[in-house]
Image: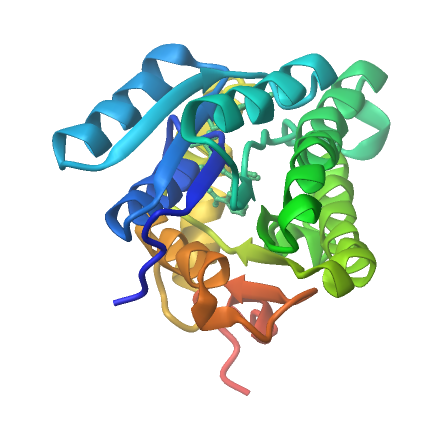
Amino acid sequence: MTRIDGRTAVVTGAGNGIGRAMALAFAAAGANVTVSDVLAPDGERTVREITDSGGSAYFVSADVSSADQAQHLIASTVDYFGGIDILANNAGIGGGQLRLHEIEPADFDRVIDVNLRGTFLCSKFAIPHFLAKGDGRIVNTASTYGLIGAPKAAAYCASKAGIINLTRQMAVDYGPDGIRVNAICPGYIDTGLGRRGPQLSVEAFRAASAVREKAAGMQPLGRQGQPAEIGEVALFLASDASSFMTGSIVTVDGGCVTTFNYGEASN
Ligand SMILES: NC(=O)c1ccc[n+]([C@@H]2O[C@H](COP(=O)([O-])OP(=O)(O)OC[C@H]3O[C@@H](n4cnc5c(N)ncnc54)[C@H](O)[C@@H]3O)[C@@H](O)[C@H]2O)c1
């Protein structure tokens, strides 16, 4: 089993879904985990799950789009655990199932602010600690929607494509300093982002969920993924098992973007 004993990891958006699964995987592999989220009860629940299983975890409330809160997240982790080794930039929001001309500028900005700027900010404040010891691992959660043009998802697609090339750029800048930066592109994963769709009306959410289920059913593995299946890949990228990987964009999508969706066509 992959181990990261004694390392300290920060996971953003760890109150739910993929971030929670990353936090559980890191803790089970021996890391101290700072669980961060805007939703305190959700983050504290993840902490309890870890500590009830004998792991080490600490909750910090932070909105990753705020420079002050991102700085506080990293500083309080260093104070509490004595350092930071791993940063998982996972917090993210969807965009609301609209075509570009229907999107309000403030709504577009919010998606970019949380998904892309949040990745920048948490990295900005973690990297000086990594530079000081010549070691660090960053795992960014992008999306298959950063690789393709998905329908009615302009802000989300743009934010995730930004994360993908930010990952490559950071790998170039910080490889010589011993800092590895990789990204995961999940496909359709069974989480609240898919189920709840906090920015959608009930009707729009139901329609979006039906589209996701149908799309997942037509991909090579024929189902949505489970958050733990992303958590395990994040653990691999955060561990020494991936020691020669940096700037890699790892799709974990049941084969979704490897194939053209032929639907009912037989040839
Ligand atoms: N679920 C999928 O199918 C899927 C596919 C591809 C990529 N992703 C990405 O995976 C990541 C996690 O998504 P999920 O599906 O687990 O969603 P989720 O909604 O289940 O969990 C996201 C968590 O992030 C938190 N969060 C939201 N805004 C925040 C902010 N400003 N600061 C800090 N925390 C914030 C939420 O409170 C929530 O706990 C996101 O970046 C998402 O874009 C998800």
Q: Is residue 196 visible?
A: no
| Image vertical order of residue 228 relative to residue 111, above or below | below
Front position in the image: 23 or 133 = 133
Side of 16 where 260 appears, left or right: right
Residue found 31% across the figure and 29% down from its top: 57
Front position in the image: 30 or 230 = 30
Counting from the top left corner in percent of width and height, residue 165 is at 79, 55
Side of 95 where 204 appears, left or right: left
Residue found 71% across the figure and 38% down from its top: 128
Counting from the top left corner in percent of width and height, residue 164 is at 72, 54
Q: Is residue 14 visible?
A: yes
Residue 117 placement: quadrant: top right
Side of 184 where 110 appears, left or right: right
Counting from the top left corner in percent of width and height, residue 201 is at 52, 17
- Residue that sits furthest to the bottom in the current view: 267
The type of colouring in the image is rainbow
Counting from the top left corner in percent of width and height, residue 5 is at 32, 52
| Image vertical order of residue 20 relative to residue 211, above or below | above
| Image vertical order of residue 64 relative to residue 82, above or below | above
